[in-house]
Amino acid sequence: MVAVNDVSFQVRRGAIFGLLGPNGSGKSTIIRMLCGVLQPSSGEAHVLRFDASTETEAIKRRIGYMSQRFSLYADLSVRENLEFYGRIYGLTPERLAERSRAVQELTGIGHRLDQLAGTLSGGWKQRLALACALIHEPDVVFLDEPTAGIDPVARRSLWDLLFQLSAQGVTLFVTTHYMDEAERCTSVGYIYSSRLIVCGEPDDLKRLPDVTPSGTRRFELDVSSPTAHLAELRKLDGVVDATLFGQTIHLLVRDELTETDLLARLEESADSATLRAIAPSLEDVFVTLTRAEEERSSAAANAPSPTRRVSEGVRSGDVNLSDQAGRSDSMASLDSGGGSEPMKRSPSLTLRVSEGERSPAASGPFWGLLAMLLKEFSHIRREPSTIFFMLVVPVLQTVIFGYAIQLDVERIPTVVYDLDGRRQARELLEAFQNTRTFTIVDRVFDDESFERSLTSGRAKIGVRVPPDYSDHLLSGRHAHVQVLIDGSDSTVATTALNSANLLGTALSSRITRGFAETLPAVPARNPAGHVALPIEIRPRLLYNPDLESSHFFVPGLVGIIMQLVTLFLTSFAIVREREVGTLEQLFVTPVGRVALLLGKMVPYAVIGSLEMLIVLTVMVFVFGVPIHGSLLLLFGLASLFLVCALSLGLLVSTLAKTQLQAMQFAFLFMLPSVLLSGFVFPREEMPLPLYWLSFAIPVTYFVEILRGIVLRGADLIDLLPQATGLATCSLLVLAISVARFRKQLA
């Protein structure tokens, strides 16, 4: 679908050019293309001698922009918004103070400097938006429906300000769908269904032949109950058109229908109805031309309609906001649908640019970085929920997960059905209890109660001691004990099975040693001369000798939580700006793309570093996990991971258009990070495709780095493969994110 087609116009210096049209006709699209935030699919446009496709940054330094909805920062004060936009345009502190006083005086906003912008009324919001658009003394100001949604008094005040600016030589480009505002413009264009139908000065447009065709006249009829007479008038012979206009009716009638005949056909006395000749209004102009356009479109759907030009000839398809005569005769076009004949130049437009009063012409990728950083820190300071989420929630998550995630299976509820009851059976049950793996929660005395304890889930383990257990042991025969294990939880079942087997082996070894002491020869004896097993394995646990689950999980939690917080906050911060329109407002400014990205990422990187320090402190002093390796190495590699996590947030912001989509994409990144990174489940035990997929997850490397430095005291040489993998992922994600992020609307 073509949003703008066959559009051509020129605007002179100091003019108030009004672009009118219904909603969806292409007005905002034209402004976005002229401001350089929307790339035209074909054609060209020039603003202040600069090509709107290739010299966008040069244009942005010399224009002001006021979007159709309030797109400043609601959580910043009036003063902070003014200072931010002044810094974005490179104003020195002295010049910023001077310009701030000037726009405050112009807009009357000075007594509200400390008020949050979001609490202003509609009229004052528009004044603030205009002040921010003028802070850098632009040569052209684009105002996209600036009076939409504000009261009539505020509309009048805003137009008074626009007239003052026009008198000072500022060129104003205003879009609106209010006809009374169109009457105030020095020249107007009317766009309908993506095409510019007519363009010229209001008085010239009213004299167009198609507006009041030859052989017709326009009248205003003042009659009681005009709505009751409207349908009747439209049916009269000689009445071409009848339209309500306030409390009167505007008529277009043929010359053969005299005023006397018209009044005579009304069911009104001459005293109660008056008729007077009038000139057409702009509303009459646009209604007439719109209907004609609709008729032509229905008659020839594919035939282009030429734009009507008044007072100057401009070839179709051109848009030019030029500031100097004598440029090349090639015109810029928004859509290559017009002819190729040369256009007639409008009068010379020379802008007054005083040295030392304009922000520097040169800019670069870091232009506006300081302004972005100060603004972002102001946002964070004004958002207690963000500070809570970044600093308190990670601590809560560390404590909850650190205590909740336990691989140590102990105190498994056990039911006992002892059919023997003698000393040997009691010693067996005490041995079960002393392992700490089993906890006897019930003793039953019949088969039904024994089975019911297991099927109900009250017990996970059932121990049945046969009645002849002691007899078999005393007589030297083989004795057996039945242990029933609930296998619905594989982790609990595996632990119970291993513990039961080890317990049986230990008890058997003790009994066997007692018997072997009486023998003249045995397979082996220990240094004390006692019977011993021939081979003794002496395992030694390193790094986590007590096998505490928290020592394994908490270091990994640092990486997971850092990614979670930075990913969500970065993506949400950018997507939220896109939703409320402030990102589009930033795109119109000369802020460098790198500065915009760094301004968004650096504050969260700083807080992310503080967050990691807090979580590590909790790890050491709450869970007693000492850091055996180098803190410098840990923070160095953590900084690299922060860049990667922030880049992931930036990537999400380029994929998502709404905060809901951002949340969905963020979870799409987070779930594999938790499940496949080795944080919970050993990667080596995963199916081969998932194992190889885990190498594409950045947090996989950082979890290994954290556990290596914290638990094993590993150095950079030990962690070189993980550090290389993390650096590769970071560079790749950052490159993709930066490549996708554009200072333009999609």
Image (cartoon, rainbow, N blue to C red):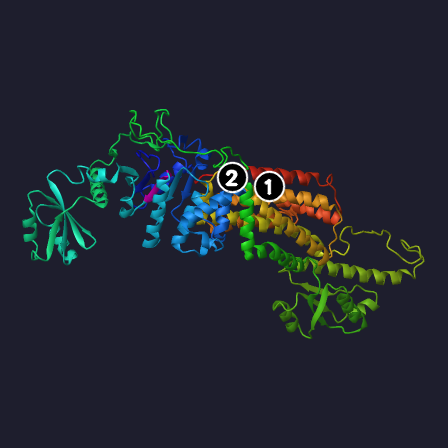
| Quadrant assignment for the C terminus | top left
Report if residue 71 is visible in the image. Answer: no
Q: Earlier in the sequence, mark 1 or mark 2?
A: 2
- Residue at screen point 76% across, 73% down: 420
Marks 1 and 2 sit apart, C-alpha to C-alpha, by 41 Å
Coordinates of residue 171 in the picture (x, y in percent) = 36, 38
Asked if residue 248 lies in the magenta stretch, the reply is: no
Q: Which residue is mark 2?
A: 90
Q: Which residue is mark 1?
A: 696
Coordinates of residue 519 in the picture (x, y in percent) = 92, 59
| Whether label 1 touches label 2, CB < 8 Å | no
Report if residue 645 is visible in the image. Answer: yes
Secondary structure character of the magenta stretch overall: strand
Q: Is residue 475 left or right of residue 245?
A: right
Q: Is residue 183 left or right of residue 673?
A: left
Extent of the magenta region: 169-175
